[in-house]
Amino acid sequence: MTTIAVIGAGPGLGTAVARRFGREGHAVALIARDQARLDTLAADLAGDGVTARGFTADVRDPKALQTALDAAHATLGPIGILQYSPVPHRDFMRPVLETTPADLAGPVEFSVYGPVAAVQQVLPDMRALGRGTILFVNGGTAVVPHPDRAGTSIAFAAESAYARLLHDTVADEGIHVAQLIIPGAIVPGHHRKDPAVLAETLWGMHRDRQGFRHFADDLDS
């Protein structure tokens, strides 16, 4: 089995995805900024029989992100699955008329430079394997821009365009690229947006390899 790299790993969706894919035999590379937190998550997963390791990187630092993915490959083996799902900063969500060029730098680094750096780093592994999956997870503003969340609306749209271009370009190489839109918040206990339910959705997207954009729930929910 190959490794899944979860970028933006946390105690909610990231851990649920790690458990779901780990249950299928995949090793898990957990990537986020806080090593102590990652070590705690990895230890919890080990208790469930999942091989997981934490690697620190800020997604707004492409070199650090690529270094973390390189370390994950060296430690856990080839990365055959990539999930890009960090949670945006609150200061990315300013009203459109109050958003300056400087305010857009962070969202673009987060939602464009980060995923591009990550994809470029893992593509050689996937090409060598002859198969791979790249999963993008975004909020509803990726599809319906919100005037009070200009940064994420603009940056998610760019990320969506990049993901769609990848979907169309690398499919012939056996690499499946898909996007999951999660409108609103991830809600424990929700019948469609509980972390474990979302992890099952993402597993199905990886397994079935059908289509590009998927919705966790209705956009107006």
Image (tube, rainbow, N blue to C red):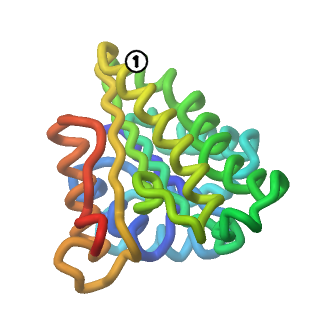
Within the image, what quadrant is residue 23 found in? Answer: bottom left
Q: Is residue 98 visible?
A: yes
Q: Which residue is mark 1?
A: 169
Tell me what residue is drawn at x 25 percent, y 42 percent. 206
Q: Is residue 169 left or right of residue 75?
A: left
Tell me what residue is drawn at x 56 percent, y 41 percent. 158
Residue 145's place in the image compared with 115, above or below, is below
**Residue 48, image x and y in percent?**
30, 71
Residue 78's place in the image compared with 158, above or below, is above
Residue 103's place in the image compared with 94, above or below, is above
Within the image, what quadrant is residue 171 found in? Answer: top left
- Of residues 204 and 145, the one drawn nearer to the viewer in this rendering: 145
What's the residue type where badge 1 is placed?
A: Thr
Viewport quadrant of the N terminus: top left
Q: Is residue 35 visible?
A: no
Which residue is the extreme one toward the bottom? 189
